[in-house]
């Protein structure tokens, strides 16, 4: 069965192979030696040996894929990116304080998601804006050398791929080079596992799973060990990184089924060449789409070329009265979920790891055809 191409920003497409495996194992999950458990993963105790093996394989799979160094912990949490907007300041903002009282955090504002993070953090600690791209309508990225970083910041928050505005950091800022010794916190929700990460520049990274890692309900946090254990007294126990880490993400019941599916996604990524192969494929997909947009008289992408996202490609029709016809024609060709975010309008194609090149080719072919017929 040929399924439609799903360009949703998240929850997003998952590879057919992964879904087929989950379907085959739905009623009876088997271990690596083929021994039947007689249960669906959904029905298993998170403390039983079957689920523990699924959990350990998922964690090891992610560590290997992302080349996460040993001095970082991987936490499987819940609450999504938005919960981390509160959980991070509750855990990190006291880093520089003598007592467990909130300190300061710096924010680089580059679009909706970093703005949301900033607003939420301000409920728990004092915040400052180190840089912003608001003047360009979130179509550029402020060069790190221009950031005004506070010497007493407990951490610096950056959203490394803005899902709505389609701007992406293609290199992580090197805070040490900027004379800043605060840890860098990255929200990499919408480009996690699409490219390699230079962990020497990162203190903590978080991502909701529902774009590139699997289903909604799982939040991945990768955190350097020395940043664990500084939670404010108001931090809910279930969100205290120390309790989560000490209990191997089982302080409370983890999202077991989402972890299982994510583990299947990690295995699928590995079988397909890992992150390096995905990154090469993502570069090729993005080039195909941006080239088609730039070569056309109808479509337009407003983001500066050097910071265009490889994952989320917003574009506009110069004749906006054609938007409805464009989307309707796309749907009849099995090209789904192309409508742009309501805050920016237009179109958006999210082309995460599970989107094959053939899907982008089909989109580009349709865009050309639509442009010709509407000329
Ligand atoms: N950060 C980014 C970059 C996102 O794209 C999103 C969701 N689209 C979020 C945070 C919020 O994630 P969640 O809905 O899982 O809380």
Image (spheres, rainbow, N blue to C red):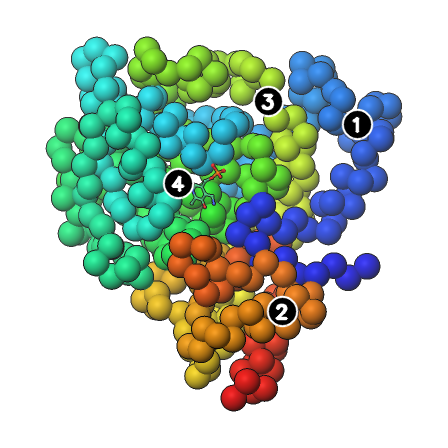
The residue positioned 47% from the left and 49% from the top of the image is: 191
Task: Using the image, tell me which numbered label, if any, was put on residue 328.
Answer: 2
- Secondary structure beneath dot 4 equals strand
2 or 4: mark nearer the eye: 2
Left or right: 146 with respect to 34? left
Task: Using the image, tell me which numbered label, if any, was put on residue 254.
Answer: 3
Contact flag, marks 2 and 4 (Cβ < 8 Å): no
Q: Is residue 146 above or below residue 181?
A: below
Q: Which residue is mark 1?
A: 40
The residue positioned 39% from the left and 40% from the top of the image is: 187
**Upstream in sequence: badge 2 or badge 3:** 3
**Upstream in sequence: badge 2 or badge 1:** 1
Q: Which residue is mark 4?
A: 187
For mark 3, does the 10 Å Cα neighbourhood hold few (<14), some (14 to 19), or many (20 or more) residues? some
Contact flag, marks 2 and 3 (Cβ < 8 Å): no
**Upstream in sequence: badge 2 or badge 4:** 4
For mark 1, does the 10 Å Cα neighbourhood hold few (<14), some (14 to 19), or many (20 or more) residues? some
The residue positioned 56% from the left and 15% from the top of the image is: 252
**Upstream in sequence: badge 3 or badge 4:** 4
* Residue 7 at x, y percent in the picture: 58, 58
* Residue 219 at x, y percent in the picture: 51, 32
- Disc 4 CB within 8 Å of nearest ligand 1 atom: yes
Q: Is residue 305 above or below residue 68?
A: below
| Gap in angstroms between the C-alphas marked 3 and 4 | 21 Å
Residue 203 can be seen, yes or no: no
Q: Nearer the viewer, residue 240 or 319?
A: 319
| Gap in angstroms between the C-alphas marked 2 and 4 | 33 Å
């Amino acid at each position: 069965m040929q399924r439609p191409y799903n360009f949703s920003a998240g929850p997003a497409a998952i590879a057919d192979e992964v879904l087929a495996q989950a379907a085959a194992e739905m009623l009876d999950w088997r271990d690596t030696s083929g021994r039947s458990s007689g249960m669906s993963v959904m029905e298993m105790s998170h403390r039983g040996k079957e689920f523990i093996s699924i959990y350990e394989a998922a964690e090891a799979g992610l560590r290997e894929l992302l080349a996460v160094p040993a001095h970082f912990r991987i936490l499987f949490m819940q609450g999504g990116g938005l919960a981390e907007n509160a959980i991070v300041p509750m855990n990190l903002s006291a880093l520089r304080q003598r007592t467990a009282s909130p300190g300061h955090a710096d924010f680089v504002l580059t679009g909706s998601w970093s703005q949301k993070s900033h607003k939420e953090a301000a409920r728990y600690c004092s915040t400052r804006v180190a840089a912003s791209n608001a003047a360009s309508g979130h179509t550029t990225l402020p060069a790190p050398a221009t950031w005004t970083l506070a010497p007493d910041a407990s951490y610096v928050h950056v959203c490394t791929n803005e899902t709505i505005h389609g701007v992406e950091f293609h290199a992580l800022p090197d805070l040490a080079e900027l004379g800043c010794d605060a840890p860098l916190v990255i929200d990499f929700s919408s480009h996690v596992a699409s490219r390699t990460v230079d962990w020497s520049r990162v203190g903590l990274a978080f991502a909701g799973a529902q774009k590139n890692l699997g289903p909604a309900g799982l939040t991945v946090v990768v955190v350097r060990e020395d940043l664990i254990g500084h939670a404010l007294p108001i931090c809910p126990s279930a969100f205290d990184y120390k309790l989560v880490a000490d209990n191997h993400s089982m302080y409370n019941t983890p999202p077991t089924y989402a972890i299982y599916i994510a583990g299947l996604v990690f295995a699928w990524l590995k079988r397909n060449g890992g992150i390096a192969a995905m990154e090469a494929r993502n570069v090729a997909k993005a080039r195909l789409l941006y080239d088609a947009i730039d070569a056309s008289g109808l479509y337009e992408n407003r983001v500066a070329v050097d910071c265009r996202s490889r994952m989320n490609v917003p574009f506009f029709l110069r004749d906006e009265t054609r938007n409805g016809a464009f989307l309707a024609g796309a749907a009849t060709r099995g090209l789904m979920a192309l409508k742009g975010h309501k805050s920016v309008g237009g179109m958006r194609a999210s082309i995460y790891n599970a989107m094959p090149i053939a899907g982008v080719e089909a989109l580009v072919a349709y865009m050309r055809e639509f442009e010709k017929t509407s000329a």
